[in-house]
Image (cartoon, rainbow, N blue to C red):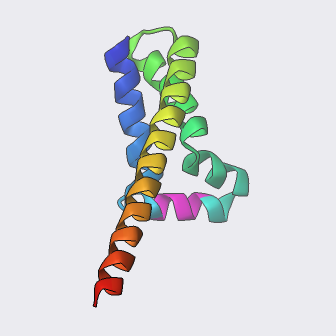
Amino acid sequence: MILHVLSCVAITCIIVHSEIFRPVRELALKLNQTLGYWISCPMCLGLWAGISYGLIVGENPITLGLLSSLSSWTAYNLVTAFGALGDYYTTMLQNGESNDE
């Protein structure tokens, strides 16, 4: 089950964040604002990816959908938090280097 959840999280991350799927996300947003939101939201797409994946591989789709949604949301927030910390420290280093000159 853990590998199935991780697979769903990977699928969700690829669709929600990759440049390859940017045109798909933009088209979905043009066609329907709700659909565009669902395909850009890691928690929403994680649910549907988990349900679909569960139906394909024969796992409980509800359980896999909920676990995938929670895991996708957690992974997204962790990556966002670490990215913000990286940006903060990069800015601090840049400001520190410019003050030395």
Q: Which residues are magenta?
A: 23-28
- Quarter that holds the C terminus: bottom left
What secondary structure is the magenta-colored segment mainly? helix
Q: Nearer the viewer, residue 98 or 27?
A: 98
Q: Nearer the viewer, residue 82 or 71?
A: 82
Residue 24 is inside the magenta segment: yes
| 66 shown above or below 14 | above
Question: Which residue is pictured at 55% across the width and 26% down the height?
Answer: 70
Residue 18 horizontal/vertical position (percent): 38, 55
Residue 40 horizontal/vertical position (percent): 56, 51
Question: Which residue is pictured at 41% across the width and 48% down the height?
Answer: 82
**Number of numbered discs present?**
0
Residue 11 horizontal/vertical position (percent): 38, 38
Q: Is residue 44 left or right of residue 15?
A: right
Which residue is outermost to the bottom? 101
Q: Is residue 44 left or right of residue 52?
A: right
| 95 shown above or below 14 | below
Residue 43 is inside the magenta segment: no
Residue 44 horizontal/vertical position (percent): 61, 37
Question: Which residue is pictured at 71% across the width and 57% down the height?
Answer: 33
- Quarter that holds the N terminus: top left
| 39 shown above or below 47 | below
Q: Is residue 89 left or right of residue 34?
A: left
Residue 43: quadrant of the picture: top right
Question: Which residue is pictured at 57% across the width and 20% down the height?
Answer: 66
Q: Nearer the viewer, residue 27 or 37?
A: 37
